[in-house]
Image (spheres, helix red, strand yellow):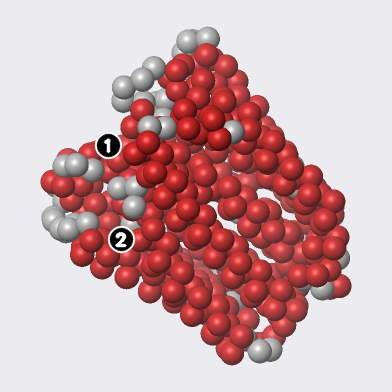
Amino acid sequence: MVDLLNNLFKKKENKIIFSNFLSLSTLNGINIFLPLITLPYLVRVLGPEKFGITAFAASIVVYFNIVCGYGFHLSATKSISVHRSNMIKVNSVFSSVIFIKLLLAVFSFIILCFLVFLIPGLYQERFVIITSFGLVLGWAITPVWLFQGMEKMYYITVVNIIPKLFFTILTFFVITKQGDYIYVNLLSSLGYIIAGVVSMIISFKMFKISLIIPKMIDIRHQLQEGWYIFLSTIGMFLYRETNIIILGIFTNYEIVGYYASAEKVIKALQSIFSPFTEALFPFFSKRTANEKPEDILKTIMRVAKYYSLVLISFSTLLLLLAEPAIKLFFGSKYLQSIDDIRIMSPIIFIGGLNYLFGIIGLFNFGRSRAFTIAVFVAGIFSIVLCTCLAPVLFDKGAAISMLAAETILLLIILYNIIMIKKQKPV
């Protein structure tokens, strides 16, 4: 593995990638460590039902987060990475993306308020849902794509650690009884908003970014660049977030709480590996401009060989340790979540390969349309399957749907990869 990495990158590039990997690993470590402190506390204090309400509200605003993010987390990263030596172009990309994201945030908030006051079930928990929107606003003004494209991820690491650590500590003082569930998402929102404001200041001070009035042609270009990624993100969230919504419709908040707890464990473990793939993304984005897809694909396949062994190991450990993990972190009230974790444990392996071959592979090879179609097929299948299984199998039905969707997505992605190797249009 060491020989592979030494041959994979030039000395300077190797240092940059290692620095980004270290920064992203630190950030993800904090994102994993802090929930490991607060999540066991919250699920015990709030109970399955109230915790389920907070998870349900967060799942609703996630859809608006998709709209505001649009696809810039990849398309803007690639643009910044390619043009980072041209500050005029960087300023243009930055200003256009921020303008679009804020405009979408305003429209999203108006729509959210309309839905909350129109639907009785949402109106009943209106404070929790509306205050959850701060997560969307915070992400809208946090230019992670700028830091990633510039390959200076340690800035975003520092920005995120301080406010999240502060509001994690604050959780233990504010959330002391079941009725305090209404403040859980509010605290998270405040943390994200502060992180966003600080990251904007760093963008202006450290990178000498200047906000300009974006031209319509630049706005149109950024929308076109991010379109397929936006669609694929929607498709991805059809099966990664919709399950909670479907459970909320067909079951109750207690069942939602069981499933949401298990899902958080899966996503927390998946985030361990995201620094590796996110550090590789801008590197391969630059290589695609000068090298043939088949040559880059050989490198990706070599990485995948070793990466798969690590992913399989984590999936197996999760399968074996699901019961003691639930008992230790969540308590006896959440024993029903054990089977959910066991069902979804292969997702660590399958989802990791989906990102590696789908985002780093297909997207950088100019096959974003193929990737989008694959994600939509998996997402629609998941919604249909979960809708059928949730009324019968409850949280286990949602877990099965998640696993099935990830598996179908991987199969379609691998088919497209095979077509690239054969040099056939897909």
Check the picture and name the quadrant holding the N terminus: top right
Q: Give the CA separation, mark 1 to mark 2.
A: 24 Å
Residue depicted at 30% across the width and 61% down the height: 102
Of 250 and 377, nearer the camera is: 377
Which mark, residue 102? 2
Residue at image location 77% in from the left, 51% down from the top: 318
Q: Is residue 347 left or right of residue 358?
A: right
Q: Is residue 107 left or right of residue 114?
A: left
What type is the residue that disc 2 sits on? Leu
Which residue lies under the disc numbered 1?
82
Q: Image quadrant of residue 340?
A: bottom right
Give the image location of residue 384, x and y in percent: 69, 42
Q: Quadrant of residue 357?
A: top right
Residue type at the position of mark 1: Val
Circle 2: is it few (<14), some (14-19), or many (20+) Cα within 10 Å?
A: some
Residue 143 is situated, as x and y percent measured from the top left of the image, at: 33, 57
Sooner in the amino-acid sequence: mark 1 or mark 2: 1
Above or below for 23 versus 371: below
- Helix, strand, or loop for circle 2? helix
